[in-house]
Image: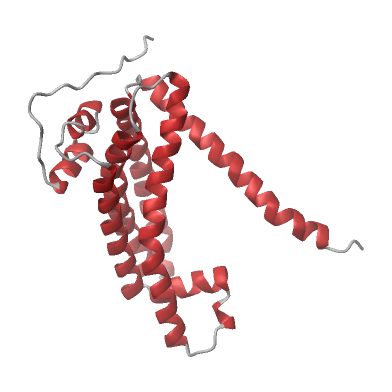
Amino acid sequence: MAETQPVNYLSETMLDRKWHEIWLDVWLHPGEASFGNMLTERNHSPGRAILWVTVTSLIFGVVGSLFFPSMYLDLFTQLFNLNLFAGTRDFKLWLSGVCFLVSSPILGILSLVLSSGAYHLASRLFKSRGAWSNLAFCMGAVHAPFTIISGLISIPRIIFGNDQSTISLLNCIFSLLSLTVFIYTIVLFTNAIRAAEKVGTGQAVLTIFIVLLVQIFLGICFGLLIVLPVISSTPYR
């Protein structure tokens, strides 16, 4: 099968759309052309994408801190051993909420910058001719709505998660929804890379695959760094 050739987007008219118009265009028309249209926006800077991700991550953080404080208290207790901190449970709930609120936009920005940077570098293996700034802008239109969608999908599971009569059905439904959104997001990322980096479909797919392999390798290495010291310190019987 012949490799899909990249398209050069040339437009005499610069677009000036609102954020929601761009997001809807990308998510309702998940093709290379939608991301090509993004690159004709008057302001298609990575700063705009970072703003999108910051706002959506803050919303996610506020909702999580206000409505699901106990869940994040358990999470941060495991990560940072909040039991060492003096204070009442209410204080620890407040502390974990603040930690989640502050960390959400930071992690969102890091995710956008690092992932777009990794895809940009990997695409260079296929002689891509795009700029990181263009790819970051295109990926921001995927990343920011994904934060909202994934948050909405998780809310019913969190609310009804302790109800044994519905937990199995909920897990099945929302696992399928999560898988569908994940696959759809991969399609969007593929077309974002095609448009921003000016590569073909196969090359964009390989770019994502290469980055995934690197992530798996780094994850294994990180896991070994944690596990090996524990194993070596365990006395033999």
Determine whether 36 is above or below 155 in the image.
above
Q: Residue at x 36, y 9 (%)?
A: 2
Quadrant assignment, res 162 = bottom left
Q: Residue at x 47, y 86 (%)?
A: 89
Q: Residue at x 54, y 88 (%)?
A: 86
- Residue 109 location, x and y as percent? 37, 52
- In the picture as drawn, the residue positioned furthest to the top comes out as 2
Quadrant assignment, res 101 = bottom left
- Residue 26 location, x and y as percent? 21, 37
Q: In front here: 168 or 181?
A: 181
Q: In front here: 181 or 159?
A: 181
- In the picture as drawn, the residue positioned furthest to the left comes out as 13
Determine whether 214 is above or below 105 in the image.
above
225 relative position to 168: left or right: right
Q: In front here: 64 or 112?
A: 112
Quarter of the image with the C terminus is bottom right
- Residue 108 location, x and y as percent? 37, 54
6 relative position to 164: left or right: left
Q: Residue at x 44, y 20 (%)?
A: 126
10 relative position to 98: left or right: left
